[in-house]
Amino acid sequence: EIVLTQSPGTLSLSPGERATLSCRASQSVSSSSLAWYQQKPGQAPRLLIYGAFSRATGIPDRFSGSGSGTDFTLTISRLEPEDFAEYYCQQYGRSPVTFGQGTKLDIK
Amino acid sequence: EAQLLESGGGLVQPGGSLRLSCAASGVTFTFSSYTMSWVRQAPGKGLERVSGITGSGGNTYYADSVKGRFTISRDNSKNTLYLQMNSLTADDTAVYYCAKGGTMYPFDNWGQGTLVTVSS
């Protein structure tokens, strides 16, 4: 099983700042089958990024994904108030599909 | 975009059973063509894919934590996904989401979730 470790656990920033979230895999993620999800309290997760760097439909371009192999990054270029939420990475290239433990992005 | 609507959650005693359903409506995708999954989230915890099923229903996946107790199925004529949960324990307490996606596919469409509480 591929274990995904996200860092930091919590990231405290202000609106307008840049956020950098990390996801490290215990084994190489095949075909860059790495996704990022955003989850707000009481809501279902929402797909932000798939294939490591492709934005899902309707996702603003301030969200970007990068990385390959075992190291991946989600960057939010300029934080908007609605971006403060929990973020999860996921690998879906190899069974079992696994998720990271999450990074909470909160307002400083 | 298709909407996924879960139902069937509730309070159940340890050892009991529940059947969750996930109905796809306003379908803009051919339901039968896509792998579907059940993902759960225990209170204050992260996400865990517990089960998945291919479009035809011919292949299924179960997490070790539910293997032998949960059964996933689908009725493509009704655009509906199911999860039969037996021998429930407190560790199964979670919000259960259905999602379009699985191995080799990102989870690009999620239901709103249904809460399952296992308690005496």
Image: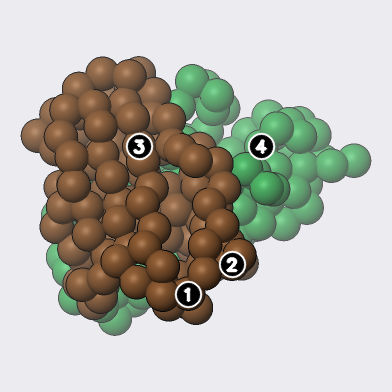
Chain letter for brown, please: A
Which of pointers 1 and 3 lies earlier in the amino acid sequence?
1
Q: Contact (CB < 8 A) between labels 3 and 2?
A: no
- Give the SS element for disc 1: loop
Q: Is residue A7 left or right of residue A51?
A: right
- Asked if marks 4 and 2 fall on the same chain, the answer is no
Q: Position of residue A51 (x, y in %)?
A: 15, 47
Q: CA distance from mark 2 to mark 1?
A: 7 Å
Query: Which picture quadrant has residue A93?
Result: top left
Q: Amino acid at mark 4?
A: Asp
The residue tagged 1 is A15
Residue A37 visible (yes or no): yes
Q: Residues within 10 Å of mark 2 (few under 14, many from 20)?
A: some
The residue tagged 4 is B92
Q: Residues within 10 Å of mark 3 (few under 14, many from 20)?
A: many
Q: Position of residue B101 (x, y in %)?
A: 27, 50
The residue tagged 3 is A23
- Asked if marks 1 and 3 fall on the same chain, the answer is yes
Q: CA distance from mark 1 to mark 4?
A: 37 Å
Chain letter for green, please: B
